[in-house]
Image (tube, grey):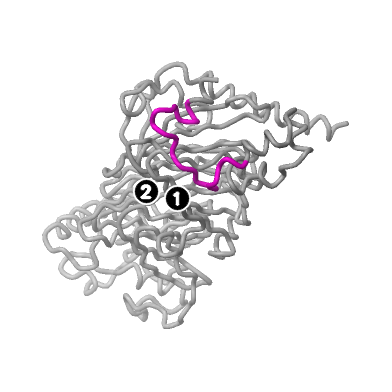
Amino acid sequence: MTGRRVATMAPLFMLLLLLTGSSAMGAPRHRERWEEGEGEWRPEEEGKGGGGEPAAGKGLFVLDKVEKVVDSEGGQVHVVRGQPWPPASFMHIGFITMEPKTLFVPQYMDSNLILFVQRGEVKVGWIHKDELVEKKLKMGDVLHIDAGSTFYMVNTGEGQRLQVICSIDASDSAGFGPYQSFYLGGAGKQVSVLGGFYPTILTTAFNTTYDELARIFTVKSGGPIVFYTNTTESGRGDKKRDAGEKERENDPWRIVGRGDEDERGNGQWTWPWRKLMGGFVGGAPSNAAEPNKKSDKTVSAPDPYNLFDHDPSFENDYGWSVSIDKHDYEPLGHSDIGVYLVNLTAGSMMAPHVNPRATEYGVVLSGEGDIQVVFPNGTLAMSAQVRPGDVFWIPRYFPFAQVASRTGPFEFFGFTTSARRNRPQFLVGATSVLRTMLGPELAASFGVPEEELREVVQAQKEAVILPPVPEKEPTVIRQVAKE
């Protein structure tokens, strides 16, 4: 009886959750969007919607809970929180913006990350099998970083702002927020995780002196995303170092100890982070470590997967789609998440379909379109117009369709909560479930003669992505919404 009661309550809880979200949409709220061509989140009244039209139809499956989790001199990170039900499908969507020549400082997180480069170029370094691996990513690249793996990012695009969309797997989160970063280096108000230990612990662990540690741990940075160059800038750098020296003179962390005067270089600290870490990791004395020398050991790590360099999973005259899973890019299996990208020509439609294995999260990259979702009881759950920056989600098993605006192409990217082959079930079209099951049993379920049903079901010659309806007729999405 207990099992039956839980099975009965689950869909009721889902419906209650959705209706609660709907009732909260009555009053205008401020949203933030990923602006097309701008790469920034801008506050906007939800009641105004996009394109001057009311946003009353935004509905249950457009996510609007946005948090700015990083705001520093070189960029920002925003997170759109996902739906916590069902728990196995819980993920957040992150948006990383980095100005040219900036560094996202070394850190590790309590969540698996899947990065997608929407615009720009980036160098990503991370620890893979106990060694540092660096990969250069371009637009369209997908890269997986395991939870707990220390990584950093450098915007290498010449004069170009970097825009990255990422999935944040919340299943293993520590629960402090959408995710929790543990910074290896200082990050503005958040100091290095090493800075919390007693100086005696650190000097012993690093095999160095108090002064040498103080030169590093008392330096204040401009936040997690900082302007960065691998060459020394004389003017600006000298001012920051001079300010740092004055601050360290009164810093309570610096207890006692004696540093090597020749390392200071006329009052300027030059002790590199790599040299200090070399003494700690390698166990050699700190003065024996060679600065800036990386390991000679070669470690093979999976290359990023570029969505644009591979043939589409499906393509016809009305659009194309790319879908990858762990069979295409093995690291996706670590977090059990899939990736997809869809491009619809003006007015075309992704036919009504169902995801039998996964919940789907999507981000509108360009263009505008309509998304329609249906409840299990056959009633309309949502009909919403979306534009660049909108984030939507589709629960597993719920039927849905996407229709591009007639003004231009409609492109959206996203993640699915399964790294297995999803095999979406299309309900309409040449390869649909209705076409496959066409027979007397299906006709009887509709209460019509088989020939009459056959005439309707076989009328559509296209599959998956369907052609636009003639302009003189209302689009399917509008027609069904009115009914």
Above-or-below relation of 313 to 457: below
Residue 310 appears left or right of 8: left
Which x, y percent locates residue 166? 45, 50
- As helix, strand or loop, the secondary structure at mark 1 comes to strand
Residue situated in front as seen by the camera: 462 or 292: 462
**Magenta part, dominant SS:** loop
Residue 367 appears left or right of 88: left
Image quarter (top left, top right, bottom left or bottom right) of the N terminus: top right
Residue situated in front as seen by the camera: 258 or 449: 449
Q: Identify the residue position indicated by label 2 in the image.
A: 96
Residues marked 2 and 1 touching at CB (< 8 Å)? yes
Image quarter (top left, top right, bottom left or bottom right) of the C terminus: top right
- Which amino acid is tagged 1? Cys
Q: CA distance from mark 2 to mark 1?
A: 8 Å
| Numbered circles on residues, count | 2
* Bounds of the magenta segment: 458-478
Who comes first in sequence, dot 2 or dot 1?
2
Residue situated in front as seen by the camera: 37 or 289: 37
Q: Identify the residue position indicated by label 1 in the image.
A: 166
Q: Residue at x 81, y 29 (%)?
A: 5
Which x, y percent locates residue 97? 32, 48
Magenta stretch: includes residue 216: no
Circle 1 packing at 10 Å, graded few (<14), some (14-19), many (20+), is many
Q: Residue at x 38, y 55 (%)?
A: 117
Above-or-below relation of 36 to 207: above
